[in-house]
Each structure stands twice: as C-alpha cells, then as structure tokens.
Amino acid sequence: MTFSYIIHIGILSGALLIGALLRSKVKFIQHFLIPSSIIGGFFLLVTYNFITPHFGLSSDFLGELVFHLLNISFIAMMLRHPEKKEKSRAVSDNIIAILLQYGFQVAFGLILTLVLIYTVYPDLFPAFGLALPLGFELGPGQAYSISLPWESMGFEGATSVGLALAAIGFLVGSIGGVILINIGVAHGWVDAETAAKLRSRGVRTGFLSKDEMRESSKFTTDSESIDSFTYHIALVMVTYILSSLVLLIVEKLLSFIGPLGVELANSLWGVNFIFSTFVAAGVRQLMIALHIHHTVDDGTLNRINGLSVDLTVAASLGSISLVAIASYTVPIILLTLVGIIITCVILPFYASRLYDDHKFYRMLLLFGTATGTLPTGLSLLRVVDPDFKTPVAQDYVYAAGPVFFLVLPIIVCANLPAYSYVQNNPLLFYALLGLSLLYTFVCIVLYIIRGKEKAFGKMRHLFYR
C-alpha cells in the first residue's frame, strides 16, 4: 500500500492553509490582495525544490494534478445553467487578442535571439527565443514537450530553458497580476461595486466575518439517496471521462495520417481543456433535452470550480524546478524583460481598447494566460469575479478552440529554427520569423478595424476608459 498521493495532497493542503493564514494576518499581503493559492504555491516551490527530494518525493505528481484539475475546472464551469445574454463580439475579440500575443512573443523572441547571435552570443541556439512563447503563452507542459527534441539537435539544456521561462512567467503573472488589480482599483479601472468589495475587510483578510457569511449552494438531491455534492462531483468526473474518450478517438484517427498526425495528436492533449469544455456543453444540452438539468446547482459547481482553481494554481507553482533558472542566465533575463514589456505594457494597452465590455476583467484573464497558464488567469479573474458571474471566462474558452487551429501553423513550424542549425540553413529560421510577423501584422490590422478610433486613442494612458 502506498501513501505517496495522500502525502502530496496533504502537503498541498497544508500549503493552502498556510497561505490562508498568512493572508489573514499579514497586512502587506492583504494590501496587494495576493490570493492564498499563490502564497501557498510559493511555499510549495520551496518545499519541493529543497525539502521533499530528501524524502524521495518529486514534484511530478503536482504536474499531473494540474493537468487534470484544469479540465475539471472548465467542466464545472460549462455544466452550469446557460445565461441568456445578447450576442457578444467578445469571442472574436478574444481570438484577435490571443493571436496577437502569439505573434508578439514569437516574433520578438526570435528577433532578440538574432540580435544576441550577431553580438555577444554567436553560439546561441537559434530556437532559444521560442522559450518565451513556450514558457509564457503555452506553459511548462508544452515548453518541455516541444523543446525536448532540440536537445538532440544541439540545444543543451533546452527543456531547462523552457521550464525556466515558464517559472518566470508564473512569477510575472502572479505578482504582475496582483499589481494590475491594485492599480485597477486605485485608478478606477474596475467598477465602483467591485472596488468596494475588494477594499472590504473580508476580502482583504480572506475570511468573512459572522455577519458577512453567506450561503452559495443548494441541495438538489435527497441526501438519503445521494448527497448533492457527491452527485455533482460524479457528474463532473463522468463528463471528464467522456471528454478523454473523445480525445482518444481523435488521436486514433489522426494516427492514420502518419508522423504529422501523431505529433498533432500529442499536442492536442496539451489543450485537453478545450475538448472537456465542448463535451461538457454537450452534456449540459443533453440534460436540458431530458428535462433533468434542474438537478444541477450553479453554486455547487462554482465551489468545485473554485477548489480546482485553488489547487491548480498552488500545484503549478510547486511543480517548477529552480535548477532550470541557473542556465543561460543573461539571455533568460533579457528574454524575460521582453516578455514583461509585451505582457505588462502592450497587452493592457490594446486589450482595454479592443473590448467593449468587462474590459479590465478580460484584460486580467488574458494577462494571466499570456504569462502563466489558464489557471493563473482564472485565479486573477476570481479576485475580481469570485463566482465567475461575468461571461469573461466562458468567452475565453469559446475562443480557445478557434485559436488553437489558427495557431497550428506556428506550432507545426516551431522546429524550423532548430532545423536551421542542424541543416545550416538560416532561411528556415527566417521563415518562422516571417510567419510570426505576418500573424502580428494581420492581428494589428484587425485590431485597428475593431477598435476604430479607440485603437490608438489616449496614447498617454496605459488603460483606456
């Protein structure tokens, strides 16, 4: 009998409790509204890098947990009762905003690599700059899997560089996101009601007073038969199994194409949450057609989603290896500075001018996903939208599907800079650079068309109101 999973979950739970305790007691943390999950994540970062290895416990479990919890989070969100709302253009705006981030991060990462090769680092591997979009925009899983073949092509420590940028991206997303929230409250980027809630004592400490306590879920089953929470957990997990089966079928069909199909199928598992989202939407529609959707309680699903997000954010930070940061120190610092400019300056500028509604919320989610992973964005969004009452998260997920297919050319061509080194053909490097610049140009044109006079209005202001 093994207790390793229980020990890992116990450590993770302890980190969250430590985070909640520090949030309730430390004024500095309260002032910057740092979520308990992020505080706990940093505790796990230290624990899994310096303590648990001595007891034979690695952070691999946390990485696997993050993968599954992300899918569970979106299933719980999509099973809720659909809101009747007017047709929004936010989904198409999300597609433009996300693709623009891909274009910026790939293009500027490659341009920086080119500058370093022709100046102080002539032996730098041409694919080095792709660590920025792999670590920031995609996350540690994709950064590892895509960069792994580069090591056999001559890029020593390629996976370490990718994971290092993913680790730094998490830090930029977590700390930068909290700073953005505080700036947003101070400068009126969020509505007065939300700002007032964020200033309240309960929000600051993380715990509600006796008078502020509230009920947020309802019983939809008779506990004599099955507990309502058990019913909802079972519904979410069965939906997750169905989504995994769908992806397995897709993977099998793609394998008939050949090596390219296998490579594409492997990359689909990295965005499994998209399949989980659409399967959950299908299950919801089936329950509505069978007139049993009344057995689903949105409040209970919000609690499941909240649990998933908290655990995911903490586990994501804890799964990072600090050893990776020791390699390529100066180039990594320069690449990080480029990433910070793109995400902390350029992104808020164009996001606030692109969207028509929930500007700050949409920018915050976009910022979190462009620096860390989707759980990072959801964690930041939940600070200002605790129960995901706005359509911001759902609109982002609906856009993620089309974005994946639109960005496939960049993903498929990601190995071109590595092949340019192996085959001694610089044109392959410039081919990907040209493709990323094309993406950036097209998205900027679409941004100007959609933003109209706002696109470059109030240039002196970072956030357009």
Image (spheres, helix red, strand yellow):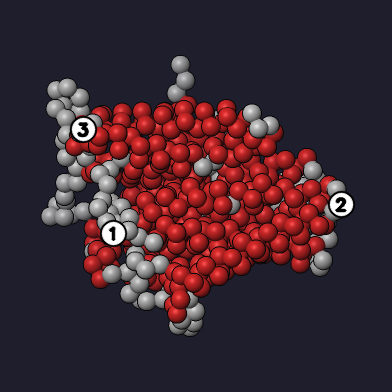
As shown in the figure, which amino acid type bears the numbered disc 3? Ile
For the residues labelled 3 and 1, the Cα–Cα distance comes to 25 Å
* 348 and 411: which is toward the camera: 411
In the depicted structure, whether residue 87 falls above or below residue 450: above
Please tell me whether mark 3 sits on a helix, a strand or a loop: loop
From the viewer's perspective, tell me whether residue 107 is left or right of residue 79: right
x and y percentages locating residue 104 in the rendered image: 60, 64
Q: Which residue is drawn at 56% across and 52% down?
A: 406
Please tell me whether mark 2 sits on a helix, a strand or a loop: loop
Callout 2: 10 Å neighbours few (<14), some, many (20+)? few
x and y percentages locating residue 90 in the rendered image: 39, 60
Residue receiving disc 2: 424
x and y percentages locating residue 217 in the rendered image: 19, 42
Residue receiving disc 1: 86
* 204 and 157: which is toward the camera: 157
As shown in the figure, which amino acid type bears the numbered disc 1? Glu
Select label 3 or label 1 by which is in front: 1
Q: Which residue is drawn at 19% across and 37% down?
A: 294
x and y percentages locating residue 414 in the rendered image: 69, 49
